[in-house]
Image: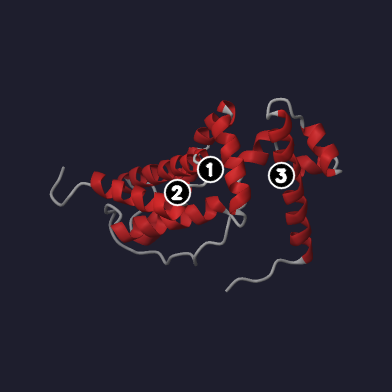
Amino acid sequence: MTTRPGLRERKKAKTRRLLRQEALRLFVEQGYDNTTVEQICVAADISPSTFFRYFPTKEDVVLTDDPGPLAEEPPAVPGPPEPPADDAVRATLHDLLARRLGPDPDTTLARLGLAARVPSLRGRMWQRQEAQVAHTAALLARRAGGAPDAYEVRVTAAVLAAVVTETLLYWAEQNGEPGLPALFDRALAQLGGLRPGPGCS
């Protein structure tokens, strides 16, 4: 059960949306590299110190996700480390998608479209994968048993994190078509083809 955010949280979310809205508008109008933090602040009528409380750098306006609602945290499954089962992989991929997509898919599409077009932003997306892999490994470990640092869990988490990033970039490059559910179904089918069968070494 979710609770309604308090007034303070709603005001912070509104300021964050305004900064991002004005930043994206300026990036489209005059280019990412030609837009300064000062220009974003003037457009949003917000001080630079306020900007940096919400976004440590200009690139964070584009690359930092506003997490969407996730399913209830899965209960831990005790047991020895094993390759995560297909249902655990599917549920984890669904959670990652919800978190990356956030509460405003249209804004996420605009941000990712910009990241796909600006080489420096695209490169930074991939540099941030390590933190995403750690988060994914923790989710997988709770669902499938074992430890987050088990080899099988880490490898599967790395693959899933890469699949999420690459799928979102492809989705943005195609301007939101086909839809994400269809793309992730294709990704799951591809992952199924790569998973070793019983007895494989």
Circles 2 and 3: CB atoms closer than 8 Å: no
In the picture as drawn, the residue positioned furthest to the left comes out as 199
In-image side of 191 versus 1 (left or right): left
Q: Where is residue 53 drawn, in percent x and y? A: 76, 44
Mark 2: give few (<14), some (14-19) or many (20+) Cα within 10 Å. few
| Mark 3: amino acid | Arg
**Mark 3 lies on residue:** 20
| Proximity of marks 2 and 1: CB atoms separated by less than 8 Å | no
Residue at the image position 48 percent from the left and 53 percent from the top = 97
* Residue matched to label 2: 178
What crowding class fits label 1: few (fewer than 14 Cα within 10 Å), some (14-19), or many (20 or more)?
some
Mark 3 residue element:
helix
Q: Amino acid at mark 2?
A: Pro
Mark 2–mark 1 distance (CA, rounded to whole Å): 8 Å
Q: Quadrant of the C terminus?
A: top left
Callout 2: SS: loop
Q: Mark 2 to mark 3: distance in Å? A: 25 Å
Name the residue tied to disc 1: 175
Where is residue 36 drawn, in percent x and y?
A: 76, 29
